[in-house]
């Protein structure tokens, strides 16, 4: 795999997220089940699932930008999350797929799953503004 982001943001670290693998060149983010991510007893909180999808999308965009030799900053424009089934009390994974990487906008689909990648617990659709960093 080519360069992965070296550090996840503090929010991801607070929920014990980590880069655990790669899928088609995109980082796979893993999040263990803990009290911090529990909603109703023995189920993931929807906010934790949404956060995992967002972190996977951000990691995928940064990976795609790096592959193009860019260190541009990104800013989230909008997010849609579809919850498909309850997240159980087990390890959860997510990966982002950049479906369009233009000069100023990026579109990403992120998928979260537990035991079977083909049975997602949630999908996220996100749009990001790409802002080239200005020289200091």
Image: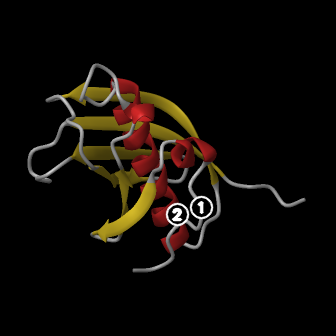
| Classed neighbour count for the residue bearing mark 2: other residues with Cα under 10 Å, few (<14), some (14–19), many (≥20) | some
Q: SS class of the residue under badge 2?
A: helix
> In which quarter of the view is residue 39 placed?
top left
Residue ID at (48%, 42%): 15
Q: Residue furthest bottom?
A: 1
Q: Foreground: 132 or 47?
A: 47
**Image x and y of residue 57, in percent:** 41, 48
Identify the residue shown where x is 52% and y is 59%. Answer: 62
Is the residue under label 2 in contact with that under label 1 (CB below 8 Å)? Answer: no
CA–CA distance between discs 1 and 2?
16 Å
| Left or right of residue 93: residue 120 | left
Q: Residue at x 13, y 52 (%)?
A: 115
Quarter of the image where the N terminus is located? bottom left
Reply above or below: 110 against 38. below
Position of 14 with respect to 26 (left or right) is right
* Mark found first going from the N terminus, 1 or 2: 1
Tell me where residue 84 appears, x and y as whole percent: 15, 29
Image coordinates for residue 101, horizontal then vertical, percent: 43, 54
Q: Is residue 54 left or right of residue 68?
A: left
Q: Is residue 35 above or below residue 107?
A: above
In the image: residue 74, left or right of residue 136: left
Q: Position of residue 55 (x, y in %)?
A: 46, 46
- Camera-near label (1 vs 2) is 1
Label 1, on which residue? 7
Q: Which mark is residue 88?
A: none
Query: Quadrant of the rendered structure where residue 51 is?
Result: top left
User: On the rendered image, what quadrant is the C terminus found in?
Assistant: bottom right
Seen in the picture, residue 6 relative to 104 is either above or below; the reply is below
Which element type, helix, strand or loop, lies under badge 1? loop
| Residue beneath disc 2 | 65
């Amino acid at each position: 795999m080519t360069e992965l982001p070296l550090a996840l943001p503090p929010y991801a670290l607070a929920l014990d997220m980590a880069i655990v693998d790669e899928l088609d060149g995109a980082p796979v983010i893993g999040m263990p089940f803990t009290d911090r991510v529990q909603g109703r007893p023995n189920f993931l909180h929807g906010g934790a699932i949404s956060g995992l999808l967002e972190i996977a999308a951000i990691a995928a965009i940064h990976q795609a930008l790096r592959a193009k030799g860019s260190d541009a900053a990104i800013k989230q424009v909008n997010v849609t999350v579809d919850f498909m089934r309850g997240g159980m009390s087990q390890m959860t994974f997510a990966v982002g797929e950049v479906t369009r990487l233009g000069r100023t906008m990026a579109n990403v689909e992120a998928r979260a799953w537990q035991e079977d990648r083909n049975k997602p617990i949630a999908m996220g659709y996100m749009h990001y503004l790409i802002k080239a960093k200005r020289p200091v």
